[in-house]
Image (spheres, rainbow, N blue to C red):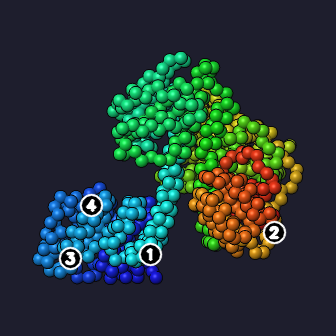
Amino acid sequence: MSICRRLKFATKLQNIMILSTKLERDYSIISRYLNLILKKDERILIIVDKIYLDRVLENLKKYVFNLDKYIDSKKIAIVECEEFIEDTNLFSTLKKESLALGYEKVSIIGICTRELNTKIELIKGAIEANCEYLCYYNVLDLSIEGLLELSSYYKGILFEDEETVEIYSNKRIKELKLILESIQSSVKAKKNTYDNIKDLEKLNSFLTSVNKIKSLDDFLKNFLKLVTNIMNASDGGILTKSEGESFDIYYKMGKFCKCIENNINLKLNENELVEKINLKDTIMIFLNINEFTIIYLCFDKNKYCYQNKDILEIYVSSARNIVNAFLEKIKNDSIISQNEKLKALGEISNGVAHDFNNILASISGYVDLALVKNQDKTVRDYLEVIKRASLDGAEMLRRIQEFTKDIKEGDEHFFELDRIIKIALNMISPKIEEKCMSGIKININKDLRENANIKGREFEIREVIINILNNAIDAMPQGGDIHVRTYNIENNIFIEIEDTGDGIPKNILPRIFDPFFSTKGVNGNGIGLSVSYKIIKDHGGTIKVESNEGIGTKFIFSLPIELEEVKNIDSVNEGYNQAYCKVLVVDDKIPVAMATGEILKSMGKEVDICFSGDEALQKLNKTKFNLVISDLAMPNLNGIELAQKAKEIYKDIRFILMTGWLGDIGDYNSDTIDYILEKPFGIEEIKKILQMFN
């Protein structure tokens, strides 16, 4: 049954509750329902909270033709919810007004985010005035008990998600309770993931600007402002002390919290990153930066709602690394060396890498599925760029962490440099198109004449090329030309990337490869060229820069030629055994679990999905599976523990451990774990695993 037919059926039920599972309120279903009611000879009263009034009107105008005409003719009346709360007789007044206008029937559409008792009072007012009503709520607006109590005032419930609506009778309370619990749990998980991503994006944005902060004092103040913002704290401050002294309030923000005076000498263990204290009317959060510095936040007890301690600990851990870097700089009274800075940056990224790799895993998985199902060349080209960008993101996280280590021989392979340059140019083409739309024309001129192979890490070389190309684009704010050339001299391949931009001043040219040095002002993070320098050196090459102010800049780097032939990836047999295989996928990150499951289903495998180790163990005790693909980091029962228990039940079961952590995951028994699958991954990685075990 289509959405339109379901909504038509809903209009016949008279009194309907819409429960939305969307994180963003868009009111599109309300608009479509309103269009159906407008065909009837009855008046419509839209009751909406004042804070949502503008958004609701904006949305209705998109979907309801001649909305202003209906409002002017008084067929539609829009009334703020606050007016009904202040005047309990307003329903009767509006009903009389409707009768005077010739409308015997009145339908009410309610969009009110009020407490349960207020919602019920408004419904009773509508019933007393003999009005039909439809009310719109988000599934997270009330508790399960509150939603069940509210449901007794409706003849049906309309569940809305991103794609469709479902109608449900409210008569079967036991089933309804289970449905509400399941939906609410799923939406909470989705919202938590959404909020986590937003908070990590804010942290990432903050960390990329650290090189612009000139002092430890400025860093701590900016960090305090950041955490106060994400946690909606009423006020906060910085506590500092010297060796052998007590803590004093060094800096405060917002209104002064007197509670800090009684808790200023709180003792925190080194491993305690976050400490929460419940006082009479206040909640205090202490962030343990180091033994000499603590950040405190104060909250009104009735308004405190931030529950994600894990994200907060990532923030504090990142701040610790930055503070340590500042202190090292002060202690040595000199600039920290290039390798030490990059190592510090790698340590910071390690805290967030797991979460980002989970995000990238779901993106990569669904892009692979889209590539299988979509044959449109333009769409496939876009999807390939998205897929490559997600895989590059994962590689970047790994490389930042391992930057101070030697490149592993096993990670290297042979590839053609000209092909890599073409991919890099394709990946920066959206930036060039964006500039062109703004009236800034940038021309790319290619002269690719190399005819040999390179051995190394393909991603890293591509990143160097993209970094330099992006620098060239940024150096030409009025537009210009970029020349990309390749050629062979003896046993080396040379690459030249030349722009016609502003050029680099002579006095700063020798510092161009220094870490955290940038010529872009607020638009640069100063890390690209220092990273590029070490990548080329690690590949046995050279890199140099030539520049003239007002004329342009040329980067020239060389890489040694390797004589081994490149294996054509397309010639590799991609066939895999289509034999029956029953697979259990386990991951507490719902998008990752669903993406992995969909990939396996697309290969004809029978798949069951669990969102915890405990749930998976229950299914293993009841059902025989040929293969388990499980996340490593899960609460209560992690992936390694689950593997041990699974092997106890079925000795011949294959167990794949997938993980978003960078580097070594610790000791594990190779008899228990058959394979480690690093996130993000796609269809090709899953195919290889199935080939391996069939």
Q: Amino acid at mark 4?
A: Thr
Label 3 sits on residue: 130
Mark 2 Cα within 10 Å, few/some/many (few <14, many 20+)?
Answer: few
Query: Marks 1/4: CA distance?
Result: 27 Å
The disc, 2 or 1, on the residue closer to the chain's N-terminal end is 1
Secondary element at tag 1 = strand
605 vs 296: above or below: below
Q: Identify the image quadrant of residue 597.
A: bottom right
Viewport quadrant of the C terminus: bottom right
311 vs 79: above or below: above
Query: Marks 2/1: CA distance?
Result: 41 Å
Residue 68 position within the rendered picture, expressed as x and y whole percent measured from the top left: 24, 69
Between residue 358 and residue 369, name the one nearer to us: 358
Left or right: 672 in relation to 481: right
Label 1 sits on residue: 166
Residue 681 position within the rendered picture, expressed as x and y whole percent measured from the top left: 68, 58
Query: Marks 3/1: CA distance?
Result: 27 Å
Q: Is residue 137 visible?
A: yes
Left or right: 415 in relation to 271: right
Q: Identify the image quadrant of residue 419.
A: bottom right
Residue at position x 26%, y 61% from top? 118
Residue 61 position within the rendered picture, expressed as x and y whole percent measured from the top left: 31, 67
